[in-house]
Image (tube, rainbow, N blue to C red):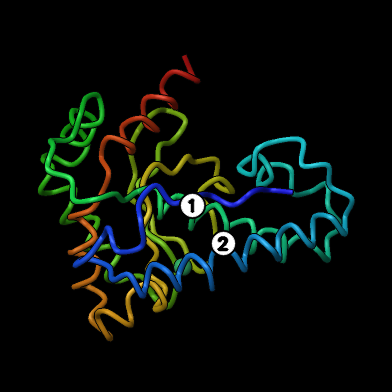
Amino acid sequence: MYQPYILKYDYSALEPSISRKTMEAHYHNHYLKYLRNLNTILEKNHFQFQYPLKDLFQNIDVFPIEDRNEILYNAGGVINHELYFDSMNRLQTSNIPEPLYSALVSKFGSIENFKRQFINLSSTLPGSGYTFLTVKKDHELYILNLANQDSPYSLGMEPILGIDVWEHAYYLDYGNNRKGYIENFMNPIDFEKVNQKYQKILKESE
Ligand SMILES: [Fe+2]
């Protein structure tokens, strides 16, 4: 079975950007439900859990066609939430480390522009979904909106930062002010962690 991601901070650590109540409900009622559903349908298919979850997206065609949507939906629900939770930490005051800093500046012009583009794209995502910062095979960075629980791994892109913009991620704290939530998400971003993921991708493709 795929095992649950353990939060690296307590539920109230991201306040005031995200409340304890939201984090607790998000982790238990939403994330863990996707994980249970995913393990159940994979076990029904006698899956051996022989590779990391992200590899499932490139191997989806080994499953019966009638199960693929449910597997992709729940696998996305797991991996997207894990990335989202891992994208944040207690208030970060440090600068964005290298090589991520230079890559962001070279792609978006400045860190301010990167944040502005991310916030603008995310605020205009129709319905439910996520906004990701992804790395393509050529190492270029892209900001990308995907609907529902779709995953960048299905597109051959590696996400290194992600925000959940389903209503359950912010409604208790922000009502329908999605943009306010996305702007405040910029505060607890764990750029050390995002940079580690970026470096790992660069290294793996050397
Ligand atoms: Fe969520």
Q: Residues within 10 Å of mark 1 (few under 14, many from 20)?
A: some
Residue matched to label 1: 82
* Place of residue 103 in the rendered image (x, y in percent of width and height, measured from the top left): 24, 30
**Gap between marks 1 and 2, in whole Å?**
9 Å
* Place of residue 193 in the rendered image (x, y in percent of width and height, measured from the top left): 33, 37
User: Viewer-proximal residue, 72 or 26?
Assistant: 26
Residue matched to label 2: 77
Q: Residue at x 46, y 61 (%)?
A: 146
Residue 19: quadrant of the picture: bottom left
Give the residue type that dot 1 points to.
Answer: Glu
Q: Residue at x 35, y 30 (%)?
A: 196
Most distant residue in the top direction: 206
* Place of residue 133 in the rendered image (x, y in percent of width and height, measured from the top left): 35, 47
Give the residue type that dot 2 points to.
Answer: Gly
Q: Is mark 2 within 8 Å of ligand 1?
A: yes
* Place of residue 109 in the rendered image (x, y in percent of width and height, measured from the top left): 12, 39
